[in-house]
Image (tube, rainbow, N blue to C red):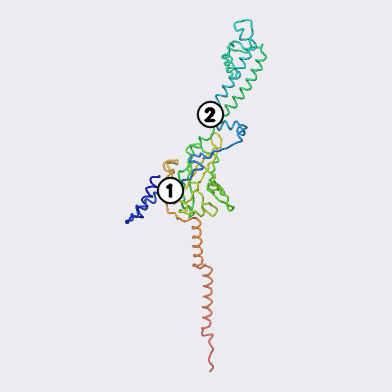
């Protein structure tokens, strides 16, 4: 990229000093390369990646205790390797903790000193050290019950500890298994089978300039109550001088008409009509190439298999919006069914499209309508003119008739 820019700089300097100008085609190619290189250099940082990941990191968070108040969500949001580590440590620490207590009870009662005494009744039979106490703790909490180490009725402190470990063990088991179940059943992976077109397009649809993109579902199980939203992420400066770096503006994709509710059985083309309420009302093709913004699209719905809410996200930068293009068709009628060809899902083709903005198109159409209104007489005017001409003819005819002429006297 830097080499191309340097090469273009040296080449442009050579054209100034040399007597022979470069051919127009070569100069145009070099200018286009330099423009592309400059565009890559000033390429906007994505707010939302193509896979839906948000490029936002929270720093200087001082109230970290808030994460502990909702420890369940905190554990679910952890990475898998951290979650597995917490899962293993939670069980291992509880087993080790109660194993130490069982060993301490046996040590205080003197059970370890009467291992060979058949007349001695220990708190736990066959508990001869810390390892056996640790194993008894595992058997108690997991309710395995091998039958070799058994608590006796001559140890009230052991009975209390048994009840306490059974209760706390059930709580730890429910909490950790619940966290792992929620983490496994999260619908994040379901969102990966919801696909968005790699580019958005701007072209005419029903004589109106529209911004369009395509969505599809790769699975046979459907997304229930699917809905689509779109946001324009663009820097803005208010009238008071306040600068908003990532201002969010709604892009209407059918909220008023209900077209944002999708029946996502086959790929659909989502259309945004560029009218006077659209943020692209004044955007032309030339201005689009110079502008900097990001379009974030959000698809939401419930997974049919689990009933959990799923959200898929994607985004389009300026260079991913194609002016004067249309999507290829992906549906074909086969013998008794419709077939979707995902090979052409992202493909587009060029169509004749005005390069002016939607505002300029509307103003030109208004001027054309006004011109036609004033240049072509209406039917009412024609009728009035016909009636006037008829009256004039009748009056002229009555004045020139011989009956109306005076008779000469004899």
Residue at the extreme left? 20
- Label 1: state its secondary structure: helix
Q: Quadrant of the N terminus?
A: top left
The residue positioned 38% from the left and 47% from the top of the image is 6
Q: Earlier in the sequence, mark 1 or mark 2?
A: 1
Depth check, mark 1 against mark 2: the one in front is 1
Residue 18 position in % (x across, y down): 33, 55
Q: Which mark is residue 151?
A: none
| Position of 366 relative to 132 (above/below) | below
Residue at the extreme bottom? 410
Residue 177 position in % (x across, y down): 57, 26
| Position of 143 relative to 276 (above/below) | above
The residue labelled by disc 2 is 82
Nearest to the observer: residue 406 or residue 198: 198
Residue 161 position in % (x across, y down): 65, 17
Q: Residues within 10 Å of mark 1 (few under 14, many from 20)?
A: some
Nearest to the observer: residue 297 or residue 44: 44
Gap between marks 1 and 2, in whole Å?
Answer: 42 Å
| Position of 230 relative to 18 (above/below) | above
- Label 2: state its secondary structure: helix
Q: How many marks?
A: 2
In this rendering, position of residue 345 left or right of residue 152: left
Residue 356 position in % (x across, y down): 47, 56
Nearest to the observer: residue 287 or residue 76: 287
Quarter where residue 88 is shown: top right
Q: Which mark is residue 38?
A: 1
């Amino acid at each position: 990229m830097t080499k191309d820019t340097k090469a273009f700089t040296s080449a442009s300097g050579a054209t100034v000093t040399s007597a022979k100008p470069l051919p127009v085609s070569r100069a145009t190619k070099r200018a286009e390369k330099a423009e592309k290189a400059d565009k890559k250099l000033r390429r906007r940082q994505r707010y939302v990646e193509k896979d839906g990941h948000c490029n936002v990191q929270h720093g200087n968070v001082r109230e970290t205790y808030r994460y502990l108040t909702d420890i369940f969500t905190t554990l679910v949001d952890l990475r898998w390797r951290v979650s597995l580590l917490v899962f293993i440590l939670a069980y291992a620490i509880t087993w080790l903790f109660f194993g130490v207590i069982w060993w301490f009870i046996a040590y205080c009662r003197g059970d370890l000193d009467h291992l060979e005494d058949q007349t001695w009744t220990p708190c736990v039979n066959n508990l001869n050290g810390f390892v056996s106490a640790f194993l008894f703790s595992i058997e108690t909490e997991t309710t395995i019950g091998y039958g070799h180490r058994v608590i006796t009725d001559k140890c009230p402190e052991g009975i209390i500890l048994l009840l306490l470990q059974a209760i706390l063990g059930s709580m730890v088991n429910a909490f950790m298994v619940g966290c792992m179940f929620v983490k496994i059943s999260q619908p994040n992976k379901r969102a990966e089978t919801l696909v968005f077109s790699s580019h958005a397009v701007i072209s005419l649809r029903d004589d109106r300039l529209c911004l369009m993109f395509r969505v599809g579902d790769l699975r046979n199980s459907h997304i229930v109550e699917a809905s689509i939203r779109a946001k324009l992420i663009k820097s803005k400066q208010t009238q008071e001088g306040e600068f908003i770096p990532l201002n969010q503006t709604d892009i209407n994709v059918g909220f008023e008409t209900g077209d944002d509710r999708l029946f996502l059985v086959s790929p659909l083309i989502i259309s945004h009509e560029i009218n006077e309420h659209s943020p692209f009302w004044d955007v032309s093709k030339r201005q689009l190439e110079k502008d900097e913004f990001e379009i974030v699209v959000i698809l939401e719905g419930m997974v049919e298999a689990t009933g959990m809410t799923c959200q898929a996200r994607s985004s389009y930068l300026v260079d991913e919006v194609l002016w004067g293009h249309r999507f290829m068709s992906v549906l074909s009628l086969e013998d008794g069914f419709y077939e979707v060809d995902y090979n052409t899902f992202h493909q587009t083709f060029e169509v004749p499209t005005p390069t002016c903005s939607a505002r300029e198109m509307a103003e030109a159409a208004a001027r054309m309508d006004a011109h036609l209104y004033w240049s072509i007489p209406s039917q009412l005017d024609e009728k009035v003119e016909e009636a006037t001409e008829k009256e004039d003819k009748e009056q002229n005819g009555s004045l020139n008739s011989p009956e109306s002429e005076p008779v000469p006297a004899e």
